[in-house]
Image (cartoon, grey):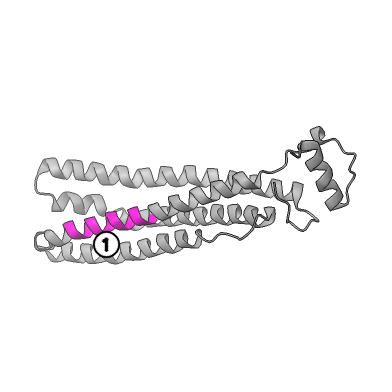
């Protein structure tokens, strides 16, 4: 079985470098197999996330349809719900389209291709962060309409608290997600500079 020294010598021969270079002094060889396994797990997570988002949206739509006559008793509430539904359609399509774009995976075991996939998914996640932040602004009137439409003071209080926490939680998630994805892109760029600059990118591990 090929050990680290043999693997390093093989890479040096393939790249035309100095085969006498010490493997212990070199950066660790990227594990493409582990990278592919991680990408496949992320793919299933994306699929289940899409399914979960649409399932929750359908449940919410069914609950709204059940109470539609009461929820739209006034003209202002009717305008709010029409606005809310149109807004959510745009948001759901934007989120789903972005997640579907992250499902595409390269064929083979090219280090360049799988690093590019990691970079692409990180950038798509940053796009989701922008969607989350911008979608918070049009939803700022939501606590007021929840309070007005509640059946009791208790329901109004908890409804407002829930909506405020949901909006604040989305912003916190967006901030942490952005930091993780920027770190991911920096890591991928560092690996690409270390292993791919001037090479054909077909290295596998």
> Does 53 appear in magenta?
yes
Q: Which residue is mark 1?
A: 84
Residue drawn at 44 percent across, 53 percent down: 46
> Foreground residue, 47 or 56?
47
Residue drawn at 69 percent across, 44 percent down: 30
Q: Would residue 104 be found to the left or right of residue 12 on screen?
A: left
| Main secondary structure found in the magenta portion | helix
> Does 190 appear in magenta?
no
x and y, in percent, of residue 192 in the image = 71, 50
> Foreground residue, 163 or 94?
94
Residue 35 position (above or below residue 134): above
x and y, in percent, of residue 12 in the image = 84, 47
* Residue sticking out furthest to the top: 24
Specify start and end residues of the magenta stretch as a single range: 50-63
In the rendered image, which quarter contains the N terminus?
A: top right
x and y, in percent, of residue 173 in the image = 43, 44
Element type where label 1 sits in the image: helix
Q: Residues within 10 Å of mark 1 (few under 14, many from 20)?
A: some
Q: Would residue 138 be found to the left or right of residue 204 on screen?
A: left
Q: Would residue 112 be found to the left or right of residue 171 on screen?
A: right
Residue 101 position (above or below residue 143): below
């Amino acid at each position: 079985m090929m050990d680290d020294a043999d693997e390093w010598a093989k890479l040096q021969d393939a790249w035309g470098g100095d085969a006498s270079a010490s493997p212990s002094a070199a950066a660790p060889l990227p594990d493409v197999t582990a990278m592919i396994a991680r990408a496949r797990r992320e793919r299933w997570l994306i699929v289940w996330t899409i399914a979960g988002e649409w399932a929750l949206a359908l449940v919410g739509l069914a609950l709204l349809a059940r109470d539609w006559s009461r929820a739209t008793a006034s003209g202002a509430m009717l305008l709010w719900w029409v606005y809310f539904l149109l807004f959510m359609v745009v948001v759901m399509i934007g989120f789903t389209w972005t997640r579907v774009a992250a499902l595409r995976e390269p064929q083979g075991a090219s280090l360049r291709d799988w690093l590019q996939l990691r970079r692409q998914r990180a950038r798509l996640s940053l796009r989701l962060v922008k969607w989350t932040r911008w979608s918070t602004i049009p939803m700022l009137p939501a606590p007021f309409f929840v309070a007005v439409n509640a059946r009791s003071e208790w329901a109004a209080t908890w409804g407002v608290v829930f909506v405020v926490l949901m909006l604040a939680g989305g912003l916190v998630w967006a901030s942490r997600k952005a930091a993780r994805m920027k770190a991911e892109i920096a890591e991928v760029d560092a690996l690409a500079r270390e292993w791919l600059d001037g090479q054909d990118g077909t290295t596998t591990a």
